[in-house]
Image: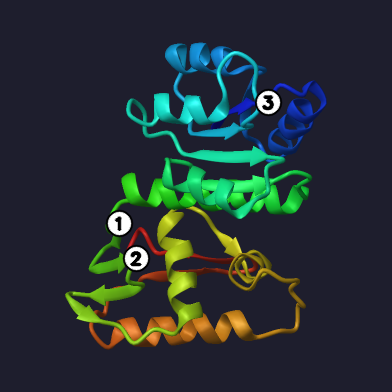
């Protein structure tokens, strides 16, 4: 994600840049409204962080100017904290408003939320199906079907099956499956993975005799791509 930081205070501009770059955003700095206008004429951005009190062209003027031309979301970062200022900016086109001084974690959370919201409205696919043999996994609705029949999978069973279908050639150890699905440490004596794999196999076998999950002895599990 590429972010334009429009802030005339050099220290604050650099601080915002460091925060974002540590989270793997690409940043471009502008120190005036006119410089921001130039950057926007030459490049496309996923987000704009915008101060209001800028030399050359104010933040309010820049919002009015670009909102009719580009759909890039804007988060205002300003020392103006009055309610009427925030309401006016949000009504005039800003997507969010953060007052100075700001906390790093709140700033990053708001950046992520605005990007997620805007991306979801414009580019998120409605549904993406994963398939293997007679099995179809619907990610958005979290449904698994074999030969068109819905499987009564638990949440963890669905996630395990999805993990394997997304990586058809990969062998997963029990530890890897546990860490991917439960997001926690694995203790070797735990029989959880075996039980879940067994349940998935039984539920699929009710509708299809083909083998779907192969045990790789001494290692773990993978999709049975041969049988």
Q: Which element is circle 3 on?
A: loop
Mark 3: few, some, or many residues within 10 Å (few <14, many ≥20)?
many
Mark 2: few, some, or many residues within 10 Å (few <14, many ≥20)?
few
Instruction: Determine the residue positioned at 29% across, 60% down.
Output: 131
Q: Which element is circle 1 on?
A: loop
Mark 1: few, some, or many residues within 10 Å (few <14, many ≥20)?
few
- Give the residue at mark 3: 7
Horizontal relation, residue 44 to residue 6: left or right: left
x, y (%) of residue 126?
27, 57
Q: Indicate how the structure is coloured in the image.
A: rainbow
Q: Is residue 92 above or below residue 212?
A: above
- Give the residue at mark 1: 128
| Mark whose residue sits in front, 1 or 3 | 3
Q: Are marks 1 and 3 in contact (CB under 8 Å)?
A: no
- In the rendered image, which quarter contains the C terminus? bottom left
Instruction: Determine the residue positioned at 34% across, 50% down.
Output: 121
Please name whichever residue, 224 or 151, is drawn nearer the observer in this view of the structure.
151
Q: Is residue 181 above or below residue 12?
A: below
Distance from the alpha carbon under mark 1 to that under mark 2: 7 Å
Q: Which element is circle 2 on?
A: loop
Please name whichever residue, 29 or 79, is drawn nearer the observer in this view of the structure.
79
Q: Earlier in the sequence, mark 1 or mark 2?
A: 1
Horizontal relation, residue 102 to residue 211: left or right: right
Q: Is residue 91 above or below residue 150?
A: above
């Amino acid at each position: 994600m590429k972010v334009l930081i429009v802030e005339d205070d050099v220290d604050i501009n650099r601080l915002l840049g460091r925060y974002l770059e540590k989270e793997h955003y690409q940043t471009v700095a502008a120190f005036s409204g006119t410089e921001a206008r130039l950057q926007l004429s030459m490049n496309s951005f996923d987000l704009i962080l915008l101060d209001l009190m800028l030399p050359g062209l104010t933040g309010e003027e820049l919002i009015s100017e670009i909102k009719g031309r580009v759909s890039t979301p804007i988060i205002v970062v300003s020392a103006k904290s009055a309610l009427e200022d925030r309401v006016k900016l949000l009504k005039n086109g800003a997507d969010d408003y953060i007052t100075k001084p700001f906390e790093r974690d709140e700033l990053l959370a708001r950046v992520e939320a605005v990007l997620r919201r805007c991306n979801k409205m414009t580019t998120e696919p409605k549904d993406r199906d994963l398939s293997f043999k007679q099995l179809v996994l619907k990610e958005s609705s979290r449904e698994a079907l074999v030969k068109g029949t819905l499987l009564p999978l638990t949440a963890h069973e669905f996630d395990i099956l999805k993990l394997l279908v997304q990586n058809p050639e990969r062998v997963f150890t029990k530890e890897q499956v546990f860490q991917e699905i439960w997001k926690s440490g694995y203790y070797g004596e735990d029989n959880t993975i075996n039980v879940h794999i067994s349940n998935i196999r039984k539920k699929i076998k009710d509708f299809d005799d083909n083998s779907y999950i192969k045990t790789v002895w001494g290692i773990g599990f993978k999709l049975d791509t041969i049988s």
